[in-house]
């Protein structure tokens, strides 16, 4: 699948840069509120680093772009993450995209063959296509959560599920408006 990516800039993950960006992002906060936000972001940046190192071991590139949709390109083993999100949200999304990798091509074609891999435009209009695609999304979130557990990241389940719910909502809206 080929995507057109419009980007202003691309970054390779650097913990120091992510912390500097966190400080800029929270500049309107003061005192205790600022300290709490910066501490949480610093913890999430360390977690991001652990997941990125896991990706490196699996020969998966992780690229952060401005204004991009988050996705895993199975063909070239690359994960794209929107760098404008907070580190915690980036972490959740990165784990989810790793979940797509963990599904693998065998499961992908056997279980979700009418989903993302489908190129037939008539099939793309079917309920089965929408169902397979949404099924894969749920599975990728579950596998991402389990990866976070295996890596002992200590992720807040409520925040992870909030990100998951917001992301899945877009698929439900998409499926409901298909003709």
Image (tube, helix red, strand yellow):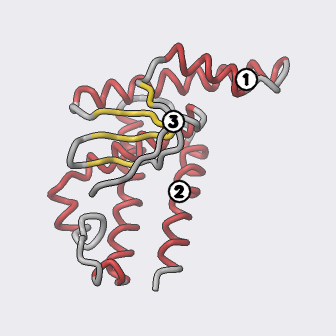
Q: Are marks 1 and 2 in contact (CB under 8 Å)?
A: no
List the single residue furthest toward the top. Answer: 16
**Residue identifier under label 1:** 36
Sequence-earlier tag: 1 or 3: 3
Looking at the image, which is closer to me, 160 or 120? 120
Dot 3: element:
loop
Please give the name of the residue rendered at 56% of the width and 40% of the height, measured from the top-left corner.
89
Packing grade of label 2 (10 A; few <14, some 14-19, many >=20) is: some
Dot 2: element:
helix
Q: Position of residue 131 (x, y in %)?
A: 37, 75
Foreground: disc 3 or disc 2: 3
Packing grade of label 1 (10 A; few <14, some 14-19, many >=20) is: few
Please give the name of the residue rendered at 21% of the width and 51% of the height, measured from the top-left corner.
104
> Considering only vertical position in the picture, is 100 above or below 111?
above
Q: Position of residue 136 (x, y in %)?
A: 34, 62
Please give the name of the residue rendered at 45% of the width and 29% of the height, measured from the top-left corner.
153
Label placed on residue 8:
3
**Residue identifier under label 2:** 167
CA gap between label 1 and label 2 equals 26 Å
- Quadrant in which residue 84 is drawn: top right
- Which quadrant, please, contains the N terminus? bottom left
Sequence-earlier tag: 1 or 2: 1
- Quadrant in which residue 48 is drawn: top left
């Amino acid at each position: 699948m080929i995507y057109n990516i419009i980007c202003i800039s691309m970054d390779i993950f650097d913990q120091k840069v992510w912390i500097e960006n966190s400080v800029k992002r929270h500049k309107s906060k003061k005192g205790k509120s600022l300290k709490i936000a910066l501490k949480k972001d610093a913890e999430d940046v360390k977690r991001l680093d652990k997941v990125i190192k896991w990706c490196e071991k699996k020969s998966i590139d992780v690229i952060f772009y401005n204004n991009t949709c988050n996705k895993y390109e199975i063909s070239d083993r690359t994960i794209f993450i929107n760098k404008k999100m907070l580190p915690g949200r980036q972490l959740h999304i990165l784990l989810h995209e790793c979940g797509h990798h963990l599904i693998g091509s065998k499961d992908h074609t056997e279980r979700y063959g009418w989903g993302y891999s489908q190129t037939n435009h008539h099939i793309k209009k079917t309920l089965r296509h929408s169902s397979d695609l949404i099924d894969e999304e749920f599975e990728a979130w579950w596998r991402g959560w389990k990866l976070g557990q295996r890596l002992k990241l200590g992720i807040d389940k409520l925040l992870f599920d909030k990100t998951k719910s917001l992301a899945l909502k877009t698929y439900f809206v998409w499926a409901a408006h298909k003709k």
